[in-house]
Structure formats: structure tokens, C-alpha cells
Image (spheres, rainbow, N blue to C red):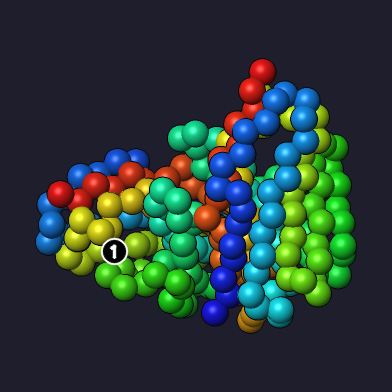
Amino acid sequence: GENVEQHPSTLSVQEGDSAVIKCTYSDSASNYFPWYKQELGKRPQLIIDIRSNVGEKKDQRIAVTLNKTAKHFSLHITETQPEDSAVYFCAASPPPGNTGKLIFGQGTTLQVKP
Amino acid sequence: NAGVTQTPKFRVLKTGQSMTLLCAQDMNHEYMYWYRQDPGMGLRLIHYSVGEGTTAKGEVPDGYNVSRLKKQNFLLGLESAAPSQTSVYFCASSSGFNEQFFGPGTRLTVL
């Protein structure tokens, strides 16, 4: 089955710096890749997603890139702010595509220092 | 709209006891999912449902059962709880091949 690896497990940056989190997946037939943010004690919430027919997607300070050949995708956060501090999860949606199920990475704890 | 709700929020069980976690959604979503979250292991899919009356196994189904008798509800059962099932349980729903909306979670401790 699908396996998603996420790195690094922890990331500490200064406010204003950029942060990059990387994920690899094993099933080349996976075709949907969301990123979720989970603040301490809260539920995960979608922040951005990308489908396999797109190489890059941006939404203000966050962007996701997808390399299907290498089977990896990355989350980029620019001009980080203290409120970006949270745990970030990547995920992949393996076939069959009509289930909508997601396989998640292990998570990255991002700390933004003021 | 309440979105996705979970009952209870917290529960402590003794080894061997049984319990049922209830997930309810008011977004008319076809798809529903149960995950467990453990430190350093992300969210792992336990069981899921693609519609009323259907269920399927996820990554870690052993020790759990589910039922989807009504479209808006998805129940997760533990027949004989074990300490290894101590975790935070999240329910989620979606309209299919897109965003999953998560409930607030249930923190379960098995002694």
C-alpha cells in the first residue's frame, strides 16, 4: 500500500524566514496531495492541496510543489510568523480514487521564533 | 452548521471494557473516516465508509469495528479495549476526492 514519509520531524526558524517541509510517497498512482495544519489541542485543517496534473500551487505565503517523476512534494511557507507555529501533515490519496482516503506522513512540528 | 462533531471528548477505560465513539456530520457528506493520532506517527486510518451501509478497512483496523447505518453518523467500536488503543481519535468527512473536515477529537485512555 501507499507509504508517505515526511521530513524533517521538527523545524525551527526565525520569524520572517522561509520554511520547507518535504514528503515522498510510494504509489505512483496517487493523485491528490493535501497539506493539513494542526495547532496544539485542535483538529487538523486543510491549508493547501495539489492534484497530480499540476506542478505548483500558491496561496498567499504558502505554496506546494509536486514532482511526480521523483514522487515527492513539498510545502513552502515564506515570511513565517509566530502563528505559523503548528504541526503540519502531508498526505497522499492512493487508488482507487473513489474512496477519498488519505495516507498521512508522520508530521512536522514547526516553531517560529519571534 | 455544526460541521463534524464527536462524542465523547474524553474517556478512560479499563483493559477489556468496550465502548463506542460517535461521529456525526451535517454537511451531507458521503465519505467518512476514523483516524487515530499517536505522537510521532501522524494520523493513521482505521476504517472508512464511502456511503450509508458501507465500511472498509484502513491501515490499522485490528481491534476496531465500525458501522454506518445512517449517512450522517459513523460509529467506531472497541469490543475489548487494550492499553495500545490509548490515543486521540479523529473522525473526518468529505464529499469525495477533496478536503476532509475533521471533528474535534476524542482522547481515550485505556488503563
**Disc 1 secondary structure class:** strand
Image quadrant in which you'd find residue A23: bottom right
Q: Residue furthest top?
A: A114
Residue at x-position 60% and y-position 49%: A8
Is B90 located above or below residue A113 in the figure? below
Kindly identify which residue carries mark 1: B77
Residues A7 and B76: in front is A7
Is B26 located above or below residue B78 in the figure? above
Q: What subunit carries mark 1?
A: B
Q: How many badges with numbers are in the image?
A: 1
Residue at x-position 66% and y-position 18%: A114
Residue at x-position 25% and y-position 59%: B84
For badge 1, the amino acid type reads Gly
Residue at x-position 27% and y-position 58%: B85
The percent position of residue A69, horizontal first and vertical second, equals: 81, 74
The answer to whether residue A25 shows anywhere in this view is yes
Image quadrant in which you'd find residue B79: bottom left
Image quadrant in which you'd find residue A71: bottom right
Residues A12 and B33: in front is A12
The answer to whether residue A97 shows anywhere in this view is no
Left or right: residue A18 compared with residue A56: left
The percent position of residue A51, horizontal first and vertical second, equals: 79, 65
Residues A67 and B3: in front is A67
The percent position of residue B86, horizontal first and vertical second, equals: 28, 52
Residues A1 and B5: in front is A1
Is B106 located above or below residue A95 in the figure? above
Q: In which quarter of the image is the N terminus of chain B?
A: top right
Left or right: residue B109 compared with residue A21: left
